[in-house]
Image (spheres, grey):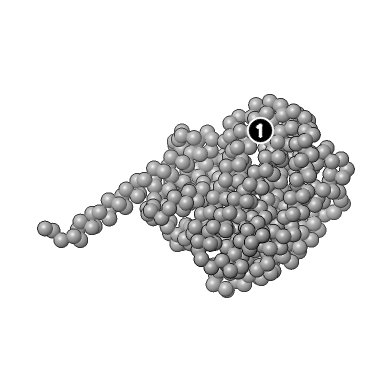
Amino acid sequence: MDKERKDIMIAGAALFAMFFGAGNLIFPPALGFLAGDAWFLCMLGFFITGVGLPILGVAALAKAEGSLDRFAGKVSPKFAKIMGTAIVLAIGPFLAIPRTGATVFEIGIKPLFPGVAPVTTSILFFAITLFFVLKPSSIVDKIGKYLTPALLLIIGMIIVKGVAAPLGTPIGTAFSQPLSRGFIEGYQTMDALASILFAGLILSSLVAKGYKSAKEQIRVTCKAGFLAGTALMVVYGGLLYIGATSSGLFEKGITKAELIVTITNTIFGAAGQGAMCLAVSAACLTTAIGLTAVVGTWFEELTHGKLKYEFVVIATVLFSILISVSGVEKIVTFSVPLLIIAYPIVIVLIVLTLLGDKLGSAAFKGAVGGTLVVSLFDALAFLKIGTGVTGELIARLPFSDSGFAWILPSISCAVILECISISKKQSELKETCPKS
């Protein structure tokens, strides 16, 4: 095997493992359970945001040479830093990293050892996380070579057994708008947000391996992203289908964590819980390692070394311990308004970056501005906070029932501001040209 192919496989495996964490394990079965016989359309929607967007995010950041300033800087350099910091905090110590620790306790430890306190599990879990992240240069290799194979083996066993011998037949659940519901649920993985940060970690690893030219880095990163995306589709599809086959077996009020535990126990019996403990621990650990390293790197670079990487990652794991004991369901509920605001903005930036360099700053500002306004009102509506006449108008926009009310304002504002910018430049050019 030549060097590049080997590096692609290791980077792709690392990307898969970093993406496949707490939410990626518990959301697909829960979504399939709710969808029942509408699971296929639901799966397609979930693939768009849970697989397609993260891989496009990796490609977009590779094109931007791993720089968030280049990725979002056309809106404004200050916006790029503010957005980057908000995303880092969201997928870092405030939401995603604590969720990994909470998931390990609720799915992997509590059913096996009911007497263990959640804080004990969190301390041990984040101590292991810290062990890996204190040597950032070897993170990608460690995840790709050791943790990913273990994770794939365990999850693969669950999926193969669950698909080969279905728990039951998916039933009709009156699940409305399965495609758009799957699309929105894909937000909860937070992977599109994480992708624009994980890509930088992969690029740094490739530079250390000797890939100096931007063309080489983009090629290898995109191929690694495609490899990771393929693996994610197989795993998500299998887990979602297994959840659908259980739609007629369990009570509707079952929590996401209880569902995956019950499914595993039903498939494997008493031995299933031990396998699930290992799978959850591996899945959550790989994500926690990747995210914690990203947080440390981000704030060290943002502060030009005033906040040292080691200090930031230690602070991150300590804060994550405190948040993780609140439980998965509370963390998930708290994350929804933030995701409603952040995800559409990241989607718009990914699309604009991949479209090319011909789009000007005005188009970026218009698209992000239009999206931000609508997303803010959508988040307020989710929180049941009155939004008056403006909220009513936004609710009547095309695709609003499916959660995509931001699409038309984004396109419209981008076109309007870009046209104004072009017109202004033409006027300035006429004024500077000598009259004949």
Image-based side of 402 in relation to 333, left or right: left
Q: Residue at x 71, y 40 (%)?
A: 239
Residue 381 image position (x, y, % from top left) = 54, 40
* Badge 1 amino acid: Trp
Q: Residue at x 43, y 56 (%)?
A: 75
Residue 261 image position (x, y, % from top left) = 79, 42
- Total numbered badges shown on the rendered structure: 1
Residue 430 image position (x, y, % from top left) = 20, 56
Q: Quadrant of the N terminus?
A: bottom right
Q: Can residue 428 be seen from the camera position used here?
A: yes
Q: Which residue is mark 1?
A: 39
Q: Can residue 18 be seen from the camera position used here?
A: no
Q: Residue at x 35, y 49 (%)?
A: 417
Image-based side of 420 in relation to 50, left or right: left
Above or below, comparing residue 66 to residue 48 in the picture: below
Q: Secondary structure at mark 1?
A: helix
Label 1 Cα neighbours within 10 Å, binned few <14 / some 14-19 / many ≥20: many
